């Protein structure tokens, strides 16, 4: 709410950009594109509001059926007065529920606004595509296309003429603090939930233990308790998620290998391939940045895996324990079987880290190369007067960049 009040002028500027030329839709097909995206924004906001308000209603009903009868508040709070009196208790209780509902409405309003502006940026890109397809029939709209392109992509084309207000840059700049705060708060909520999970009562822990055993291992094959130690639960859970994600990333790479080849072919062929010395220099600068980022990421991942393996060798291995507790369909008390199973866990850990580095490095590299193409396109647009035939290549490169995105 504070961020929206502080940025109300910026919000008005952003909405004015969308409703004024050259971003304002004019033709019938442009209006159709605009209404399609606008309808999507409305549908998303309504669904999000229904989900959030349904959650608030569930919390309210649950509290009325449990806490209200016991004269307890919905949320524990420190108050500078004694609310044991019925009148004060009712006021405090209603205040908490009203604050809960108002907070949820504010979340819907702020998130819907930011999401709506981002979706409308995508709408502007679609409208720009439609206008570029009509350039051959209507050459007069080229000027408006360039102005609209500058408003959308000035944040990426850093060296272009600082002529217009950048819509995408403005959205990112004005709401950076809001998005950061929301991310931090969401992270804290998850951390506190995990902390409460480790401090649950015996009854709740046994119920959770039974549920996990039945749904995961089939309890008749699993006799030892998996929740005896909360640290084991957190370790296994924290390694299970990255390994699951690594397998999904590997599957995604295998399924999309043809698309990856197509994307790399687009970057290595005309008109995206750099040809002039300045273009080659821009490409080399971005390519070097990709190599450095990937190397640092790989180093960080391998150092983490090495540290885990080294600590496990110094502690678990000497005690005949595995690095991660696991259910296996055989007895591993034998030294040879234990060593094989122990090595299997460490090898899987390293392979999962390498898969993460490979997939994340590939995706990050493609995104950075898209930024590189923007820089090259900006250079070519600045030199459009000096080199004949550049406009055609610029239009083709612009279309290829959209295909990459």
Image: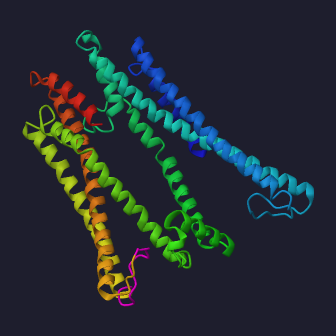
Q: Residue furthest bottom?
A: 318
- Taking the image as shown, residue 84 lies to the left or right of residue 102, namely right
Q: Is residue 270 magenta?
A: no
Residue 236 in percent (x, y) is at: 45, 71
The range drawn in magenta is 316-329
Where residue 79 sits, quadrant-wise, is: bottom right
Q: Quadrant of the N terminus?
A: top right
Where residue 350 sits, quadrant-wise, is: bottom left
Q: Residue furthest top?
A: 137
Residue at 26% x, 41% y is 371
Residue 369 in percent (x, y) is at: 22, 44
- Taking the image as shown, residue 108 lies to the left or right of residue 74, namely left
Q: Nearer the viewer, residue 285 or 112?
A: 112
Q: Count of labels shown?
A: 0
- Taking the image as shown, residue 360 lies to the left or right of residue 28, namely left
Q: Nearer the viewer, residue 348 or 19?
A: 348
Residue at 32% x, 33% y is 153
Residue at 30% x, 67% y is 301
Q: Residue furthest front?
A: 220
Residue 120 in percent (x, y) is at: 45, 29
Q: Quadrant of the C terminus?
A: top left
Position of residue 248 relative to residue 373, above or below, is below
Identify the coloring.
rainbow
Position of residue 337 relative to residue 137, above or below, is below
Residue 2 in percent (x, y) is at: 60, 45
Where residue 275 sits, quadrant-wise, is: top left
Give the prevailing secondary structure in the magenta stretch.
Answer: loop
- Taking the image as shown, residue 162 lies to the left or right of residue 282, namely right
Q: Nearer the viewer, residue 238 or 396?
A: 238
């Amino acid at each position: 709410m504070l961020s929206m009040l502080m940025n109300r002028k910026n919000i008005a500027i952003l909405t004015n950009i969308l409703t004024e030329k050259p971003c304002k839709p004019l033709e019938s097909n442009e209006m159709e594109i605009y209404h399609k995206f606008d309808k999507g924004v409305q549908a998303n906001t309504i669904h999000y509001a229904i989900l959030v308000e349904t959650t608030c209603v569930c919390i309210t009903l649950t509290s009325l059926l449990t806490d209200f009868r016991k004269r307890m508040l919905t949320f524990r709070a420190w108050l500078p007065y004694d609310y044991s009196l019925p009148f004060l208790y009712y006021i405090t209780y209603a205040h908490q529920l009203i604050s809960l509902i108002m907070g949820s409405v504010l979340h819907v309003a702020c998130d819907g606004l930011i999401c709506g502006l981002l979706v409308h940026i995508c709408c502007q890109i679609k409208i720009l595509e439609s206008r570029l397809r009509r350039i051959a029939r209507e050459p007069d709209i080229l000027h408006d296309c360039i102005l609209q392109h500058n408003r959308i992509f000035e944040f990426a084309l850093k060296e272009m003429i600082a002529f217009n207000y950048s819509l995408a840059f403005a959205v990112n700049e004005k709401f950076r603090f809001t998005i950061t705060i929301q991310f931090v708060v969401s992270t804290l909520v998850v951390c506190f939930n995990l902390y409460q999970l480790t401090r649950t009562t015996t009854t709740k822990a046994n119920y959770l233990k039974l549920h996990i055993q039945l749904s995961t291992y089939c309890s008749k094959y699993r006799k030892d308790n998996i929740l005896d130690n909360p640290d084991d639960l957190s370790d296994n859970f924290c390694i299970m998620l990255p390994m699951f994600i690594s397998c999904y990333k590997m599957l995604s790479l295998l399924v999309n290998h043809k698309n990856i080849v197509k994307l790399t072919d687009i970057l290595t062929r005309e008109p995206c391939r750099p040809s002039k010395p300045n273009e080659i220099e821009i490409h080399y600068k971005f390519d070097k940045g990709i190599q450095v980022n990937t190397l640092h990421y790989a180093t960080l991942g391998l150092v983490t895996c090495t540290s885990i393996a080294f600590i496990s060798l110094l502690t678990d291995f000497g005690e005949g324990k595995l690095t991660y507790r696991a259910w296996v369909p055989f007895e591993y008390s034998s030294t040879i079987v234990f060593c094989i199973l122990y090595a299997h866990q460490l090898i899987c850990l390293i392979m999962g880290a390498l898969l993460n580095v490979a997939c994340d490095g590939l995706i990050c590299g493609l995104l950075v190369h898209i930024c590189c193409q923007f820089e090259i396109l900006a250079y070519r647009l600045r030199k459009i007067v000096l080199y004949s035939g550049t406009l055609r290549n610029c239009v083709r490169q612009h279309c290829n960049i959209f295909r990459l995105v």
